[in-house]
Amino acid sequence: MATTIKSRFPLLILLGIIFLASVCVTYASYDEGSEPRVPGQRERGRQEGEKAEKHRGEWIPSYEKEEDEESRVPGQRERGRQEGEKAEKRHEELKPSYEDEEEKQKYQYHREKEVQPGREKWEKSEDEEQVEEEWRGSQRHEDPDERARLRYRKKITKSYEEDDTEERSSRNPFLFRSNKFLTLFKNENGHIRRLQRFDERSDLFENLQNYRLVEYRAKPHTMFLPQHIDADLILVVLNGKAILTVLSPNERNSYNLECGDTIKLPAGTTSYLVNHDDEEDLRVVDLVIPVNRPGKFEAFDLAENKNQYLRGFSKNILEASLNTKYEIIEKVLLGGQETNAIVKVSREQIAELRKLAKSSSKKSLLSEFEPFNLRSHNPKYSNKFGKLFEIAPQKKYPQLQDLDVSIKCVEINEGALMLPHYNSRAIVVLLVNEGRGNLELVGFKNEQQEREDKKERNNGVQRYEARLSPGDVVIIPAGHPVAISASSNLNLLGFGINAENNQRNFLTGSDDN
């Protein structure tokens, strides 16, 4: 046993030496592999030190996040610094002034009062918070654009309240406001105005293409100079008193006219009108039916533009017709100064005209030129709420029968209602003479569209409303139900077109209500 151990002892020593050698080699390899890494760390440390000197006071990221943060943080910091400087500068420049404080209060008040369509009124607490937030934001209320929007909102609100009636009328093709009259002549003595063509508003009024409405107004002691028109006229006195002189080929007739008097003047009839009242203005309306061109007519004034009638003829015709040398004709007849359509007249001239004037006739049968009064006969409907006078185109009124036109005067007392009704044939041109009220007319949707849009129309029933004021005109087509209420005593004048055999049908109540 001892011999065996002794024989193996050198082998054990050899193994120990090998083990120690391997340990030494491993330790040396470790030192050799770790030694080169130290200079890299020192280099990076040196670079970080230089960066620290350049950016004193800045936060230096940790070693693990160094590569990601080095390029990103300095840019963010710089942008933050620039934004901070801009915010401070803007804050100093945009400090609210005393005027801005007043505007803020007004803005807050209007926002509390504002109601958006389809929404309930905003709660006060929520509104106050929102107003304060918007006011404090320098990019909101202090922005000139925002302040301009606030002023625009106030302007639009005010404009909407003032123009509400006009906007409604623009959506109502049946209503013609008084401002739709075009002034043809005006001076200190009065004016002449013509309503726009009916067929320009809607193709529904195509049958009214050849009917026009003209209004005359004259102050006391004035005269409309003689003229004739290439159109048939139905003249109605709305207010005041007048003397109408009609010149025919063989005679001259003068008539005293008062409120409600009506007369037909055939096309080409020369006439002149005098307001002989001392205080009241004269108002007259004509239904004009042109004979040459549909919807167009001309007035030929005898005294206008240096007697334009005679000046239109040649020298030879004038000399042969008047049996006088042209030099005398030019001096006496053509040398006058240009005159106005409405002039002042003296009391003496009016007195001479009154001597020859006749009053409107109350006879059962009238001649073609004699005037008649709408109120001279019993009203067709009458009760404590109002009256309706009407003259239909019948034999005893040849003036109206020839033109197939009826005339009516409607008086509705304050608070009363003319029940819903419609006309079977007549198209009514209704003029508001006095008072105010409301009108409701039932028609079809989109009736103001042009003829080519008919296929796309919605044929559903629609109610058209109108607030009536003096001078307004309403067109009531045949078959369209209508109702009228009076907010004050209301006086209406109506012309019925195609009125022969017309029937008025009430939808509610009875004929005497």
Image (spheres, rainbow, N blue to C red):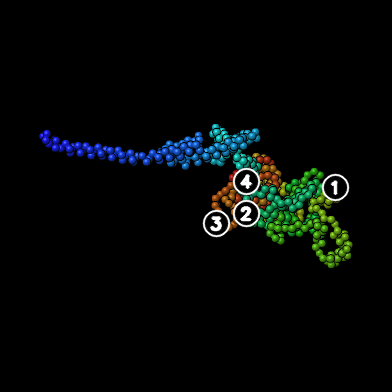
Of 322 and 357, nearer the camera is 322
Q: Are marks 4 and 1 in contact (CB under 8 Å)?
A: no
> Pointer 3: residues within 10 angstroms few (<14), some, or many (20+)?
few
Task: Please name the amino acid that badge 2 sits on.
Answer: Ser
Pointer 3 or 4: first along the chain: 4
Residue 219 % position (x, y): 79, 47
Q: Is residue 296 above or below residue 492?
A: below
Helix, strand or loop at label 2? It is: loop
Residue occupied by mark 4: 168
In space, the residues marked 3 and 2 are separated at their CA atoms by 16 Å
Residue at mark 1: 347
For the residues marked 3 and 1, what is the alpha-carbon distance in whole angstroms?
Answer: 63 Å
Rendered residue at 67%/54% (across/down): 197
- The picture places residue 223, in percent across and down from the top left corner, at 80, 51
Position of the C terminus by quadrant: top right
Q: Secondary structure at mark 3?
A: helix
Task: Name the kind of residue labelled 4 in the image.
Answer: Arg
Dot in front, 3 or 1: 3
Q: Residue at x 56, y 41 (%)?
A: 117
Tell me how far mark 4 sits from mark 1, CA to CA: 47 Å
Mark 1 vs mark 2: give the one in front: 2
| Mark 2 lies on residue | 202
* Along the line of sight, the residue nearer the viewer: 343 or 355: 343
Q: Which of the 4 image quarters holds residue 125?
A: top right
* Residue that badge 3 annotates: 455
Q: Residue at x 31, y 40 (%)?
A: 29
Lateral position of residue 448 relative to residue 181, left or right: left
Amino acid marked by disc 3: Lys
Q: Within 10 Å of the Cα at label 2, are there few (<14), some (14-19), or many (20+) other Cα atoms?
A: some
Q: Earlier in the sequence, mark 2 or mark 4?
A: 4
Q: Left or right of 326: which side holds 183? A: left
